[in-house]
Image (tube, grey):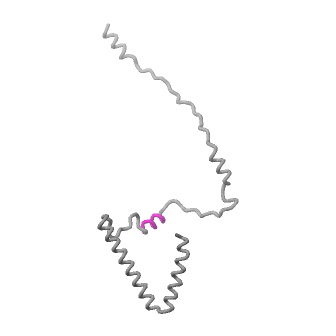
Amino acid sequence: MPNFMRWAVPTVIVLAIIGIAGNPALFFQRLLFLVFIGALIFFAYRFYVSKKYGAPFLPKRSGPSREQLRRAKHTSTTKRGVKQKSGALSGPSKQAIRNSRGLKKAPKRRSGPQLTVIEGSKSKQKSKNKKRA
């Protein structure tokens, strides 16, 4: 697609210059006619899609508006850093990054929790034994 655009845009510009130089009124009349036909085809297609698939005729933009995005960007607490130029002092080398990825930190050994046994009162068991005797 980009290769096509590289040739299509200059070709259209050259043809437009030739059309303007010959008869500007006729050129703009043809241009207006092409825009009208394009709009007619667009609205016919949208009408067809809305009837067949239940899509809205003119869909509204979903998501936040431009004003909401601008306001969120303005009030954001995170600050964008300035891009650094690539060079020798820009950061760690690729080899250092590879080495750091390969090495995993050993988990620290922790001693288990210190548990103590708390003995409860045994008076309930004694009272049961007294009742039986």
Name, please, the residue furthest toward the top: 133
Indicate the position of residue 124 as horizontal and vertical percent values.
35, 17
Q: How many marks?
A: 0
Compared with 56, 122 (above or below) is above
Residue at horizontal 53 percent and vertical 80 percent from the top: 11
Residue 53 among those drawn in magenta: no
Q: Nearer the viewer, residue 110 or 54?
A: 54
Q: Residue furthest left?
A: 51
In the displayed structure, does residue 101 sit left or right of residue 4? right
Q: From the viewer's perspective, is 92 left or right of 63?
A: right
Residue 122 position within the rendered picture, expressed as x and y whole percent measured from the top left: 39, 17
- The quarter of the image holding the C terminus is top left
Q: Residue at x 31, y 10 (%)?
A: 131
Q: Nearer the viewer, residue 16 or 129?
A: 16
The image position of residue 79, as x and y in percent, is 54, 61
Q: State the residue at coordinates (50%, 85%).
A: 16
Q: Position of residue 42 (x, y in %)?
A: 37, 74
Given residues 106 and 51, the one toward you in this image is 51
Q: Which residues make up the magenta segment?
A: 67-74
State the predominant SS element of the stretch in magenta. Answer: helix
> Residue 25's image quarter?
bottom left
Q: Residue furthest right?
A: 88
Residue in the image at 46% along x and 23% along y:
118
Q: Quadrant of residue 129 in the image?
A: top left
